[in-house]
Image (spheres, helix red, strand yellow):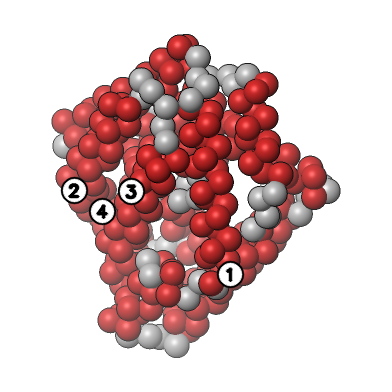
Amino acid sequence: MSRVVRIVLALLAVALSACSSSTMTRLAYANAALAYSNMASAIAWTVDDYVDMTDTQEAWVKERAARAMDWHRVEELPRARKVLEAMLAKSAGAFSAEDLAGLQSEVRAFLLRAMGHLVPDMAEFLTTTDVEQLARIEKKMAQDNQDFVKESSRGTVEERRKRRVQRFVAHLEAWTGPLDDAQLEIVKAAYRDTPDFTPDMLGERRYRQGEVLALVRARTPRAEMETQLKRLFVDMESWRRTEYREAVRARDAKMQEAVAAISATLTPRQRASVRSRIEGLIRDIDKVTSAS
């Protein structure tokens, strides 16, 4: 996960990264417990949008999505709670860049475990798709890529950089409340020399999409399908370009330093906002786990 300030969103909505639409993101920030309880339905809706499932497939996806959420509730939410408790214990003071790097590593581990858990179901489902469904998947992926390019290339280079800053600030302010001018300048300074990774992101998503489509077209046996999906969605470091991997690490380190610097300047009100956010998310986890 490349955005430190999305930590808890990732912890609570990690069940399927494909479901991180703007609607689910807003819901997760407003009411994480409600977002979590609706995640299984969101998974089924997302799959149907790509595939136009048969009734049998839809019932299967809903059952497997519910099963995956049960696993996540039992196995992952207690881990998430421990991460939040550690954040809460440090929230009275500043977070160091090392603290934030550790948190980011925790989030990445949550994401990869969730994807690894879902891979067998993904492989089994893809072996059930027919020619018409494959064509729909391919068309939807192409449209997604077109929308991604259109949005990411909108405006000048400077305008695009400003949008990235605004998105980062919006996520950060969801925790701290409004940032002052000096704090905003820390974010802007961090982004001045940060490259735009849009071409690399687009290249990776097209590569994964092409590989998945090729696996389905070839009617790859389920076991081999599972192995290849794990490589594509879990073991990404095995095929990611070295230059891109190192550039992302450098970007992450710079943003960790920026957030650490901001955390040292938080006002009492901002620090209370951070603490309140963490406490609220712990309550959300308790609410979700106690309802199981």
Q: Residue at x 22, y 43 (%)?
A: 79
Residue 159 on image: x %, y %: 79, 43
Cα gap from disc 4 to disc 2, whole angstroms: 10 Å
Residue 272 on image: x %, y %: 41, 15
For marks 4 and 2, the one nearer the N-term is 4
Cα gap from disc 1 to disc 3, whole angstroms: 23 Å
Q: Nearest to the eye among marks 1 and 2: give it.
A: 1
Q: Nearest to the eye among marks 4 and 1: give it.
A: 1
Dot 1 corresponds to which residue?
243
Mark 2: few/some/many CA within 10 Å (<14, 14-19, 20+): few
Q: Residue at x 66, y 43 (%)?
A: 191
Dot 4 corresponds to which residue?
68
For marks 4 and 1, the one nearer the N-term is 4
Q: Residue at x 29, y 58 (%)?
A: 113
Q: Amino acid at mark 1?
A: Glu
| In this picture, residue 157 sits left or right of residue 193 | right
For marks 1 and 3, the one nearer the N-term is 3
Q: Secondary structure at mark 1?
A: helix
Dot 2 corresponds to which residue?
75
105 lies above or below 177 = below
Cα gap from disc 3 to disc 2, whole angstroms: 14 Å
Q: Amino acid at mark 2?
A: Glu
Q: Secondary structure at mark 2?
A: helix
